[in-house]
Image (tube, rainbow, N blue to C red):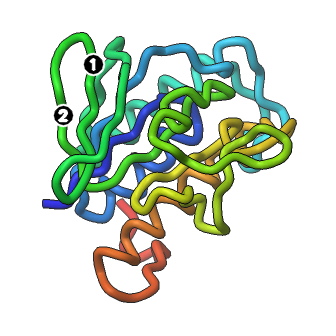
Amino acid sequence: MTHVAIVGGGPAGLSAALFAAKNGLEATVFDTDDTWMHRAHLYNYLGIESEDGTAFVADAREQVEAFGAERRQGEAVTDIERARDGFLLETDDGEYEADYVVVATGTDRDLLEGLGCDTTAEGTIAVDIDMETSVDGVYAVGAVARAQKWQAVISAGDGAAAALDVLSKEKGERFHDFDTPDAAE
């Protein structure tokens, strides 16, 4: 099964995990709980009238777990390297292989720079419209790829775009995740 490793447990990372797991990919989220959402209150997130950022993260974690994503809470990724046909992620607890990597580490770009990902003149990680970096199979989502556009809803969209691109690559055609009322639980 195709494995997507997601580094970061805020809106961008959890959104990527949701789309990946919901659509049959193995998704692992490495979540150190350093998300800015713990200092936020959502009034400007479409569909949410008012919600504390910590409560939002708890709801999102529950949702991704319900779709089968694995969360490695408190486990920090310390290095990412290319390996065989994918990537090797190192943590203090072990090593993990993945076919794709989505990095959602806020403004911390160290892991991506260590992989040799191109940067922009603004110092962010350069990505294409699908949030893929110059390293095939590596995605940068949220603030790591955006200068000063750090809204939770934008970050969640970045994570979704990355996961949909991975799904498109795996299925060999453009993939869309569009649910209809008859398919809803």
Image x and y of residue 143, in percent = 71, 36
Q: Left or right: where does residue 19 sit relative to residue 21? A: right
Image x and y of residue 135, in percent = 47, 56
Please tell me which of labels 1 and 2 falls first in the chain.
1
Which quarter of the figure has residue 76?
top left
Amino acid marked by disc 2? Tyr
Query: SS at mark 1?
Result: strand
Image x and y of residue 73, in percent = 33, 17
Q: Quadrant of the C terminus?
A: bottom left
> Which numbered marker is on residue 50?
none
> Which numbered marker is on residue 96?
2
**Up-down relation of residue 91 to residue 141 (above or below):** above
Measure how far apart labels 1 and 2 are at the Cα level. Answer: 8 Å
Residue at 64 percent of width and 28 percent of height: 106
> Which numbered marker is on residue 91?
1
Would you say the residues marked 1 and 2 are in contact, meaning their CB atoms lie under 8 Å apart? yes
Structural crowding at the residue carrying mark 2, measured as other residues with C-alpha within 10 Å and reported as few (<14), some (14–19) or many (≥20): some
Structural crowding at the residue carrying mark 1, measured as other residues with C-alpha within 10 Å and reported as few (<14), some (14–19) or many (≥20): some
Q: Left or right: where does residue 178 sit relative to residue 66? A: right
Residue at 48 percent of width and 29 percent of height: 9
Q: How many marks?
A: 2
**Up-down relation of residue 173 to residue 105 (above or below):** below
Residue at 67 percent of width and 19 percent of height: 36
Which quarter of the figure has residue 10?
top right
Amino acid marked by disc 1? Thr
**Up-down relation of residue 35 to residue 157 (above or below):** above
Query: SS at mark 2?
Result: strand
Image x and y of residue 157, in percent = 64, 54
